[in-house]
Each structure stands twice: as structure tokens, then as C-alpha cells.
Amino acid sequence: MLKKLFLLSILFSSTTLVSSNAMADSSLLNVSYDVTREFYKDFNPAFAKYWKQKTGETVTINQSHGGSSKQARSVTDGLEADVITMNQSPDIDILYERAKLIPKDWQKRLPNASSPTTSTTVFLVRKGNPKNIKDWDDLIKPGIAVVIPNPKTSGNGKYSYLAAWGYVIKKGGDDAKAKDFVNKLFKNVPVLDTGGRGATTTFAQRGIGDALLTFENEVNLIKKELGDQYDVVYPSASILAENPVSIVDKYVDKHHSRALAQAYVDFHYSEAGQEIAAQHDLRPRLESVAAKHKAQFKSLDLFSVDEIFGGWAKAQKTHFADGGTFDQIYSK
Amino acid sequence: MINNMAKQKNVLPGFNLSLGYTIFYLSLIVLIPLSAAFIKTTELSLHEFWAVVSAPRVVASYKLTFGASLIAALINGAFGLLTAWVLVRYTFPGKKIIDALVDLPFALPTAVAGIALTAVYASNGWIGSWLEPHGIKVAFTPLGVIVALTFIGLPFVVRTVQPVLQDLEAETEEAAASLGANRWQTFTKIIFPAIWPALLTGFALAFARAIGEYGSVIFIAGNVPFVSEITPLIIITKLEQYEYASATAVAVVMLIISFLLLFAINGLQWWFNRRATTSH
């Protein structure tokens, strides 16, 4: 009896193995962060249609969403993603550093440092802007409450922190002044949520805070989903948040899906892909699409992480590692 | 003792097999994953280990986690006992529903509990908006942590005390009363000694559960360092930064403290049991 069961189980497991192998060519797993859910809901069918026209092959794209660092950790720990799409390059770098799943220079493989879209950190305030918040300086005034997710656990929070720091530097300040500024800013933060969506809930549903700092694309989604009770405030300067994409070499080779995965990441740069991104309030790179959506994306002084902080690795070490400038705000 | 074991062997055979199975099972489920945490920690030197686990911010989180867990377990001890008492000793319409409600914190995903509690206790929530004018803030303060931990720990005390109360015959209380004991004496001399071990077990379970709780607390705490940051969040934060070794270092400290506390509670129980049996 037991022997029979054992044989049966072997039989079953081998058939499932075979079928998943046969499927491998025409399915992809895209591991992404939290707030791209809506974007990929439109992007994936468009790509499937394009791929069908080009090759006649039907492709299924599976999505996995979650907090960005958590997702990246899943892939390094063995979640076999063909494609990884994140909101900051350190979460893709880790695939090289921890598990050698991709080459070190992965960012050089695609245009714009492998980042087909960008966004920026803006402010969401209560309707009518009762506290009259116009720029970064207004956020550090006494009595203003600002909601920012924890920079240590959230890419969204990291960008907000670096945006505030970079704003001071851009205005001609030095590191000491910038440090003092972010100190004052975070003294006004009553709740440190672990992720961007949590911070949105705190601000919108719980009524905490006078301003929420988050990505431009998230802000517009909030206005769409939660009604017109908010105004968006564009500061005079903010950070260029780059959303990198990469194929995961080790797993596409294992799944024999390299060509498909490559086409999928390339599609992000195509006119159709860029148009879908723009419709989801992600800033496109392609001039033609950007020109079409000019009114939608207000121009402001945008600075990149490389420009002000000398790259993500350095920013991470100086600001967010244990004992870094962020921890110093809370040290006694 | 040996005599006793031999006797048991006669009554129920297979002692060696079942003991072997128990050890194997515990190793697989508990010891191996836990030892992995200890082994990962050895990547740090002793000096680094100490620097991580004794950082002021981490120490502040221990105080909050263990303090709030203790308070929550005490609240559950008192009110869980009361709930169990009501459920056992009285009949009233809707009793079955209330009985089922007690288990709800077990079944509910903790994140859902956290979001629901935050919605209710935030300054614009049902209870929060009523407390706020009195200067009481619950959501996004350490008080919120206690509320969440009390919520998730409720079933433990009720469910451990309930069966013991059920077995306790009302006749013993009547006998005590007929022998001239007043109500207080009946409670302290008759009822309390009988339910005390179960109450202590329930308290220990609620306490242990609260220490490790993450999902529900994270939404209501506010997570501000030195104020409302719990130790499990410190661990998650370190994991998010890919600092596995220092994350496990903090986890190991939590494990050791929890183990010592639970060990002490078990010891206390043993001591009470022994005292109870020798005094008879």
C-alpha cells in the first residue's frame, strides 16, 4: 500500500515537472514592488498582444507584488523571477551582491541606466491647503505634521529623505545644514509606517498629518481612488526617482526564457510601453510621449541620486545604514 | 521516579518510540530553525554582537515589547478570568455567540486586527474621537501597542481557565459557604487555588504570544524610534537592509529573554503545585 502511494506520488510529481517545463517558454514571472500593480495590469496585456503579433506565441505574465526590499530578498533567496522591476537600483544590485543572479554592470545593459520610467517625490495636502504648504521649508515649521514612511524599510521613504537633503544642497547649503534640515523634518513626523501604502492609509484614512510625502504616481492614484479631498503641491525642487528593470540572467537561462524576458523589458522603452506608463503617472523617457503628456507632468528642478549623493551605494551607507544620518536623528 | 516510568511502560507500551518521535519532531519544528538563528549570529564577533544588541534604540524596543506584553498579559489575566467565569457560571441569551467571539483573535489575520484597531482608535475613529478630547491618545502611541497585544492575547487565558472552572463543582463552594466561609474566603481558599495553575499557563501563553507579535502592532504603534518601536520591527528593519546577522542577533536576545521568562513562569507553577500537594 505504502509502496503504491510512493510510486503514485513520484508519477504525479514527474508529470507536473514536465508540464511546467513545457510551459516555461511562454510564461514569465515579473517580481515588482507594491504600487506598480495597476500599471502592470495594463502593461502586461499590451505586451502579450505585441508578442503574439510578433511571434504567434501566447505568453502568460505572472506578477508578484510587495514591499520592494522584501521582494528583492525573495528573489535572492530563490524565487525564480525572470524579470525584476523595482523603484530603486539597490534592490536590484542585491541580486548581484547576494546571489550573483545578474552581472555587476546590469544597469549598463539598457538605456537610461536601465530605468525606463521615473517619478519624483511630491506633497499631498488636505483640500484647500489649510496650512499653506508651498515648499520644503514649510514642512519643518513647528506644528506641521508630515507623514513619511520609514526610510529604513521603504524605498519611498528613502527618496523623500534624500529629496529633503538634496533640496538644501541645491539651495547652496552644506551637509551640516542638510542634516539639520532633515532632523527638523523628521521631528515633525508623528508616524513612521513601514511602507508607502501604509503611510497613505495613515494620512488618508486616519486623518493624521498635514502633508504626505510620496511618489507623484502614487499621489495621483490616491486622488483617483480616495476622492478629491486632497491637493498636490509640487516643491521647487525634488529628487528624480528612477525605476529600474532587469532580466534575471540565472533564471531566464534556467527557464530558457531569455529572448522573451529581454523583449519584455525592452517593451518598457517602446512608444506603447511609455504611453501606458504615462497614463499611470510614471514620467516617460521617450521625448514624443513626454511631449504629449507635458501638461500632466509639472516641470520642477529634479536632481538625481548620482548627482547629489554620488550613487545609491554611497547614499545607503551614509544615510540609511545602522548609525547613519537617519539613525542619528533618533539617537539620544 | 524510575519505578514510576517502568510502571508507565507497562500500561502504555512504546515509550522509547514515542520519546524518540517527540525529540525528532521538536527538533524538526523548533530546534533546527532556532539553532539556524544562533548559527547565523556567529557571523558576528562578540564585540559586534554586543554593539548590536545593546544599542540604545534596541534596548528601548526591548523595554516596550516586554513591558507592553507584560501589561497586556496582566490585563488578559484579569479580564480573561472574568470572561471565563461568566461563560461557565451563567446562562444567558447569546452565550454561544460570545463564546465563539473569544476565539476570533486566534483566527483573524493579525494585519486585519491591526488595521481594524487603528481605524477604531485613531483620533477620527469611533473610540479614538471620543477619547481624544480627554487627552487620551491610543493609536500611534505605546498605549496602542498594549491595546493590540491585549486583543491578540485574549483567547489564551479564557480557553485555559474555562475547562478548569467547568470541572470545579459548585458544591465545593456551597460546602465552604455552609462551613461559614464568606465569599472572599470561598474565592481565595477554594476557587483561586484550583484555577491558579491554569490562569498562570494562560498568562504565560498570552505573554509569549505578545512578545513575538508583529502584524497587528505595526499598524497601530506609529513605529517611532525610542517611543513606539517594538523589537520585532527592529528585526524586520535589519532584514530589509539585508543585515541578516545583526537581525538574528536581536532575535537571539529576544529568544533568550523569552525562554528565561517562560522558564521562570513554569518554575513558579511547579512550585505552587508542589506546595498545593504537600499542604494537603
Image (cartoon, rainbow, N blue to C red):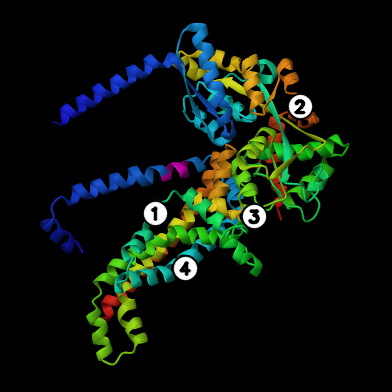
Per the image, label 1 sits on a secondary structure element best described as helix
Query: Disc 1, disc 3: CB below 8 Å?
Result: no
The amino acid type of the residue labelled 1 equals Phe
**Is residue B258 shown above or below A324?**
below
Q: Which amino acid, by three-letter code, is at mark 3?
A: Pro
**Is residue B271 shown to the viewer in this render?**
no
- Looking at the picture, does residue B260 appear above or below residue A299? below
Report which residue position mark 1 lands on: B106
Distance between the alpha carbons at the discs numbered 1 and 4: 17 Å
Q: Which residue is mark 3?
A: B56
Dots 4 and 2 on the same chain: no
The residues bearing labels 4 and 2 have C-alpha atoms spaced at a distance of 57 Å
Q: Nearer the viewer, mark 1 or mark 4?
A: 1
Q: Is the residue at mark 3 from the same chain as the one at mark 4?
A: yes
Magenta residue span:
B34-39
Q: Which residue is mark 2?
A: A295
Q: Position of residue B43 (x, y in %)?
A: 53, 39
Q: Position of residue B19 (x, y in %)?
A: 23, 50
Residue found at x 19% / y 29%: A5
